[in-house]
């Protein structure tokens, strides 16, 4: 919540340090769970224990009677429309007559100690009548199954029909694949503080990915105009898609307005597993037809995503899975059917790389199968079929900038391989590690490859924009720029990028990043790898407007035209230095606000799926090297190397950091990360049972960054955050297949899949 | 109950502490020291790591009452009067901090590792930090930071 300033110089292409780095290492950075206010109370949520039940009544009297309790609220206390949702308003902020998943919020308590609030919540008596639950998404569209939502169980169906409707090919390969439910597992719990203003409005300090959409949703439920519910970005402890939907937002505000007191909410880790959406599990059936040489003639894909009880981002996930789900390949004839359905499982929504992550496991496994069948090297078959600049993708959209699929996959192949194991090995390097399960016997090495692509920014006709306000003035005799956007910094380093752009465009050293809030226009979502592109574009455009205004001022003062800014000097058309920026500014402050939109996209044709759905594509490849203890089914990833085209690396060190972190998440899905749901109930809502990679699990990573500028994007940038999460997992799965000879048609790969 | 303890060299006391409160909760919510983080509160992530009498512990697993009379050092106590500790400096400079939620725990664990073993090998670093989760970095730059701190 404090503004951050740094004097570290660094323009685009440099790697200046993050301006919040020092606060983060001293413990002073204020995360959403650190907030504190005099006289605040603590809010907790009572959630449904059932995946599907009717509510006949809620008795809050025993809870209210507990000393220290300030409020107990249910849906009856919601002043506005009791509906939230990113794409469909289908979810009550607090359950009404039905709960549709285990963990659905039913009631709220505010008390002066969190334990008092928890104890009070346990005293709330909810009269549930359990209903039959739909928990198998493959049956969601059958006759006679429970209807999860009033409009039926289909969220979205997407079809693509391109080329020959009945294609034939001499070589045909096919497979079925299944992807488990992954969790974002950001470390900072969902949390925030709502502070009433005493006049019926409030300020909400919260960790989120898109302040303005949250504000819209909060205002709808609270029945407040936007100026009465002001949102401020609190420190965010990671997001990865899991903060696109609301968590504590509306609940904390309801409690604050009812009690008239500041209310803090902060989920414990087990609640966090129920308090945000997950990555959609998917069932995929794929078929490739190809020539004897391995050139693709056609592809067919049938993809099913389990959206769980509420839609969240399912529409967009189906959009990505359908339009991008055949991978970065040239395919003349295409049939795709992608569906997202409602069930009584936990709601699924956004997570890094959505739609593409699931599909990539299938198309990359099938590409290996095709390579083996036709006797072509697994790298070269990808180079042979890979997209290039000027190709059309499966929705008929022209790829109008670099698409270096062949170069990426060959680049990872050519990176140095880890030494082959010889002689006595350090057990810490072996599968099982210090558990001492093997000294090398039964351990087989395998190498796997994958290449994938992802859309950047919001697609299918969405008006995707960001807003930036840039102010330039003298402070202590020195020009200082202040940049104000509402674009969420979630750890990725957007604030560093904003500073770099200001320094580059305005020739100043000092750039203050204004706290993020809703007092400036929307920055759009921190998702879809879009902020450097879109908010970066907005900051650049605002700087250009400021620069133009400064030059107008200089022309007026100096009485000459044709001026330009060179560093912090005003120079004439002939290059003569006429004044410094400081001289020209004097006591004036120049401020400009710009709303910047990326190139429009369009909706796809509902029958053929054809259209210019996406604004930009980003490509990456991975090579994984694994050692597998084939007797115990334990896997050690020995190397995970990658190449990615980032267009232009605005901050090369931060780019590498994104690629490394993204690769780890993809590896996690391949090997260990799954929310286990049986009969609609989550079995492992803890870090004891939901495993994410530790420093012992992660191998060294070689990262090769290519920079083929996209001529349509600011500075040529290409989104960075998601591609590594898409290609790393399939490469790991391929490496395990190579080591074991097993088909492995499901991730995460478990030991029993290898040994049985 | 009432507790008294030393944190970062200063005496602190807190009244009306409920028996079920952890040291982490007491630090964060009663003593105004929210630097230690609460990513899991079940001993799995290391984000709450502090020194207690010189030994790193998960403060979420220590009852506040157990800290009675003890000497605690948190991330807020790592920097000296002359600036950041070399471990903190290295984390900033090597890009080991993204969201930073894991960082306080990593800093204390690394500080302890380097005090015991000033020149750790990579396997020793990995072993020492195996109890600290990071979701953002993939750990590569954390390893860089530890190596850098060891050489500074
Ligand atoms: S918060 Fe203590 S180990 Fe996670
Ligand atoms: S930097 Fe975000 S969890 Fe480590």
Image (tube, coloured by chain):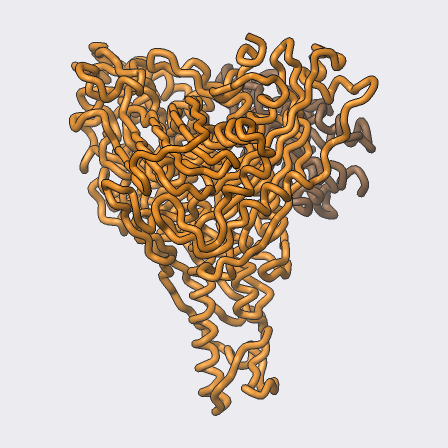
Chain colours: A orange, B brown
Quadrant that contains the C terminus of chain B: top right
Measured as percent of width and height from the top left, residue B99 is found at 54, 40
Up the image or down, A454 lies above or below A279; here it is: below
Is residue B46 visible in this depiction of the protein?
A: no
Residue A6: which quarter of the image? bottom right
Total labels drawn: 0
Front residue of A60/A479: it is: A479
Name which residue lies at 43% across and 76% down: A549
Q: Residue at x 20, y 42 (%)?
A: A223
Left or right of A233, for residue B103: right
Q: Which residue is drawn at 74% across and 11% down?
A: A441
Q: In this view, does A50 lie above or below A339?
A: above
> Which of the 4 quarters of the picture holds residue A262?
top left
Rendering coords of residue A474 (x, y %): 53, 71
Residue at 49% x, 22% y: name it.
Answer: A747
Where residue A607 sits: x, y (%)? 23, 40
Q: Is residue A325 visible?
A: yes
User: Which of A31 and A111 lies nearest the eye of the viewer?
Assistant: A31
Q: Position of residue A750 (x, y in %)?
A: 54, 15
Say whether residue A682 is left or right of residue A480.
left
Question: Does residue B52 sit above or below A466 in this rendering?
Answer: above
Q: Please name whichever residue, A50 or A292, is drawn nearer the observer in this view of the structure.
A: A292
């Amino acid at each position: 919540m404090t503004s951050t300033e740094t004097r570290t110089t660094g323009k685009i292409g440099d790697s200046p340090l993050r301006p919040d780095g020092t606060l983060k290492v001293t413990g002073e950075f204020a995360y959403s769970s650190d907030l504190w206010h005099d006289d605040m109370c603590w809010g907790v949520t009572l959630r449904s224990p059932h995946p599907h039940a009717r509510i006949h009544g809620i008795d809050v009297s025993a809870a209210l009677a507990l000393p220290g309790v300030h409020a107990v609220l249910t849906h009856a206390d919601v002043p506005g429309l009791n509906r939230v949702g990113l794409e469909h308003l289908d979810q009550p902020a607090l359950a009404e007559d039905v709960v549709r998943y285990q963990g659905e919020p039913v009631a709220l308590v505010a008390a002066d100690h969190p334990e008092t609030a928890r104890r009070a919540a346990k005293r709330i008596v909810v009269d549930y009548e359990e209903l039959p639950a739909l928990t198998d998404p493959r049956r969601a569209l059958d006759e006679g199954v429970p209807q999860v939502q009033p409009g039926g169980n289909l969220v979205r169906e997407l079809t693509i029909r391109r080329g020959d409707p009945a294609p034939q090919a001499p070589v045909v390969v096919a497979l079925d694949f299944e992807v488990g439910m992954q969790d974002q597992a950001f470390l900072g719990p969902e949390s925030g503080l709502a502070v009433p203003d005493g006049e019926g409005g409030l300020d909400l300090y919260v960790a989120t990915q898109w302040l303005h959409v949250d504000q819209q949703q909060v205002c709808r439920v609270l029945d407040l105009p936007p100026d009465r519910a002001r949102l401020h970005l609190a420190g965010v402890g990671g997001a990865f898609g899991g903060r696109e939907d609301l968590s504590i937002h509306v609940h904390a505000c309801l409690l604050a307005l009812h009690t008239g007191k500041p209310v803090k909410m902060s989920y414990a880790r087990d609640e966090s597993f129920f308090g945000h959406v997950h990555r959609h599990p998917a069932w995929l059936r794929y078929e490739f037809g190809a020539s004897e040489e391995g050139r693709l003639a056609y592809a067919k894909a049938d993809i099913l995503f389990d959206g769980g009880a509420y839609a969240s981002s399912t529409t967009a996930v189906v959009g990505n899975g359908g339009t991008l789900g055949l991978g970065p390949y040239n395919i003349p004839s295409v049939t795709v059917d992608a569906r997202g359905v409602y069930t009584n499982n936990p709601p699924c929504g956004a997570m890094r790389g959505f739609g593409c992550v699931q599909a990539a496991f299938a198309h990359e496994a099938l590409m290996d199968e095709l390579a083996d069948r036709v006797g072509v090297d697994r790298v070269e078959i990808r180079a042979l079929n890979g997209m290039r600049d000027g190709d059309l993708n499966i929705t008929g959209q022209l790829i109008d900038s670099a698409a270096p699929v062949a170069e990426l996959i060959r680049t990872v192949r050519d990176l140095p391989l880890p030494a082959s194991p010889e002689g006595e090995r350090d057990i810490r390097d072996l599968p099982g590690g210090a558990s001492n399960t093997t000294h090398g016997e039964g351990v087989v090495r395998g190498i796997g490859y994958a290449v994938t692509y992802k859309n950047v920014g919001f697609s299918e006709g969405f008006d995707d924009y960001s807003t930036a306000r840039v102010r330039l003035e003298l402070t202590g005799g020195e020009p200082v720029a202040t940049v104000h956007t509402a674009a969420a910094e979630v750890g990725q380093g957007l604030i560093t990028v904003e500073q770099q752009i200001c320094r580059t465009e305005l020739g100043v050293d000092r750039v203050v990043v204004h706290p993020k809030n809703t007092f400036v226009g929307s920055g759009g979502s921190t998702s879809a790898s879009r902020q450097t592109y879109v908010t970066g574009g907005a900051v650049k455009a605002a700087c250009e407007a400021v620069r133009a205004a400064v030059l107008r001022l200089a022309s007026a003062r100096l009485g000459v035209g044709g001026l330009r800014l060179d560093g912090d000097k005003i120079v004439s058309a002939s290059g003569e230095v006429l004044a410094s920026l400081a001289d020209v500014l004097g006591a004036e402050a120049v401020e400009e606000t710009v709303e910047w939109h990326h190139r429009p996209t369009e909706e796809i044709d509902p029958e053929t799926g054809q259209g210019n759905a996406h604004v930009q594509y980003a490509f990456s490849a991975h090579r994984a090297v694994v050692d597998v203890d084939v007797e115990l089914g334990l896997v050690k990833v020995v190397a995970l190397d990658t190449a990615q085209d980032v267009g232009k690396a605005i901050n090369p060190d931060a780019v590498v950091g994104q690629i490394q972190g993204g690769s780890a998440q993809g590896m996690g899905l391949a090997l260990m990360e799954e929310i286990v749901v049986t009969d609609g109930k989550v079995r492992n809502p803890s870090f004891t049972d939901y495993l994410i990679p530790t420093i012992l699990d992660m191998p060294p990573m070689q990262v090769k960054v290519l920079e083929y500028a996209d001529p349509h994007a600011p500075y040529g940038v290409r989104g960075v955050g998601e591609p590594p999460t898409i290609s790393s997992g399939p490469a790991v799965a391929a490496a395990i297949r190579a080591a074991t000879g097993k088909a492995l048609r499901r991730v995460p790969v478990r030991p029993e899949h290898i040994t049985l | 109950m009432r507790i008294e303890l030393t944190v970062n060299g200063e005496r602190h006391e807190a009244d009306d502490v409920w028996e079920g409160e952890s040291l982490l909760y007491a630090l964060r919510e009663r003593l105004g020291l929210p630097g230690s983080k609460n990513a899991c509160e079940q001993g799995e992530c290391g984000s709450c790591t502090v020194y207690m009498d010189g030994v790193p512990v998960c403060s979420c697993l220590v009852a506040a009452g157990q800290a009675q009379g003890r000497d605690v050092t948190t991330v807020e106590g790592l920097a000296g009067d002359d600036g950041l500790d070399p471990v903190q400096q290295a984390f900033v400079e090597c890009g080991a901090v993204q969201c930073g939620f894991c960082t306080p725990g990593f800093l204390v664990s690394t500080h302890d590792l380097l005090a015991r073993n000033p020149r750790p090998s990579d396997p020793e670093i990995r072993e020492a930090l195996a109890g600290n989760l990071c979701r953002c970095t993939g750990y590569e730059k954390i390893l860089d930071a530890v190596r850098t701190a060891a050489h500074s």
